[in-house]
Image (cartoon, rainbow, N blue to C red):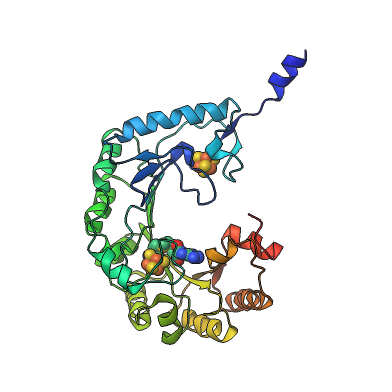
Amino acid sequence: MKFLNIFKNKKSYMCPLLNTNLHFTSRNTLEPCCSANIGPVLVSSLSDKKTIKSFIKEKQKFIKMLKKGKIPDGCRNCVHLTEYKKIENLKIDKITLNHYTQCNCACIYCTQGNRTIEKIKEDANKPVLFDVLNFINELYDNDLIDTKKLYIDFQGGNISCLKNYDEIINTFLNRGVGTIYIPTNNIVYMPVIENLLKIKKGEICTAIDSGSRETYLKIKQVDKFDKSVENIKKYIESAGNDSIIIKYIIVNGYNDNIDEFRKFIDLMIDLKIKVIVVDIDYRDIIDRSFTIPKHYYDIVEYAKDACKKNNIDLGIPPYTKSVLEKGYSVK
Ligand SMILES: C[S@@+](CC[C@H](N)C(=O)[O-])C[C@H]1O[C@@H](n2cnc3c(N)ncnc32)[C@H](O)[C@@H]1O
Ligand code: SF4
Ligand code: SF4
């Protein structure tokens, strides 16, 4: 009787990311999820000539473990774990491309290694770790992609510094894709982005983090505020403002003041931006000893008010929201 009860109470789990996501990392590996918090459960080196097919097979082991109620070590306490639900379609519907770190600016907060102007010059000449195109084509050839839903997330360094970005994007467009999301500093104008926006297949997100050239220079370490704004204007003129998101990351001691934020909001109104995101520098929100200062709340309140008045959608990422509610990070 007791045994039957245990059996009945045994939970089954699943992870939507494990089921249908793929992450090409800057560590020369392929992983099933892009969980910044925990895991990942499976790390496969891309230099040992593994095929994607064998990787997908390998990850089935963990999907089955979760279904049987056993949580692999790499997934323990992960926010993405949910109760098991039968999913018919396990084709890949999200690919994160993080296999390159080259960039043309040096944001002081960048999570892609310690950024200095010297390092970005050094990085510019490094080849990418591997050509992601072989793997992408293999996925399509083996019918492993949900071609209607597929969401591509270009993380990495900056897309303008990735040598074969055109070829990668065109492969997705030719073989089937839902949306291509491109976070970019917009220092270089890219016709391929203009086209993606025009045909409603692309979304861009640019962290401007400032409302003035001086603050931008301090944070990004390049004097490209005007260029970036000019390029945003150009995209809007030719493709509209539906899929352009602009971000303000509050960076302690750099742009964490209402004056700067006000200038930023004025610029957003001027550009007719529809969506802005306010975030807090990850380095602070994952630092347990950081208590959110009062003036951060003032900025968020100002943002809420200004966005409401000007019909702008305000996004605050879920983890940042929960840190703001608690006043400190509880990781
Ligand atoms: C590493 S970047 C790569 C894409 C592109 N170069 C860009 O900056 O948009 C990916 C995303 O992480 C964000 N990011 C990087 N470091 C961060 C930090 N310390 N705090 C908050 N967001 C950060 C960037 O704003 C960007 O949206
Ligand atoms: S549960 Fe977390 S660590 Fe495990 S596969 Fe899912 S996202 Fe990755
Ligand atoms: S633009 Fe992106 S990749 Fe480049 S330094 Fe800034 S956050 Fe890092």
**The quarter of the displayed image where residue 298 is located:** bottom right
- Quadrant of the rendered image holding ligand 3: bottom left
Residue visible at 67% across and 68% down? 291
- Across and down, in percent, residue 246 comes to 46, 71
Taking depth in this image into account, of 278 and 191 the one nearest to the observer is 278
Q: Is residue 184 visible?
A: no
Q: Which residue does the image show at 30% across and 38% down from the upper left?
A: 139
273 relative to 143, above or below: below
Expressed as whole percent of the image width and height from the top left, the position of residue 78 reads 58, 44
Quarter of the image with the C terminus in it: bottom right
Q: How many marks?
A: 0
Q: Residue 34 vs residue 171: left or right?
A: right
- In what quadrant of the picture does the N terminus appear? top right
**In which quarter of the view is residue 330 placed?**
bottom right
83 left or right of 43 in image: right
**What percent of the width, then of the height, locates residue 18?**
48, 38
**Residue 96 relative to residue 305: left or right:** left
**What residue occupies the far right of the structure in this picture?**
1
- Residue under the image location 65 percent in, 78 percent down: 295
Q: Residue at x 38, y 81 (%)?
A: 225
Q: Closer to the camera, 302 or 281?
A: 281
| In this rendering, position of residue 202 left or right of residue 121 | right
- Note whether residue 221 is visible: yes
Whole-percent x and y of residue 154? 36, 56
* Rendered view: 161 above or below 266: above
Q: Quadrant of residue 119?
A: bottom left
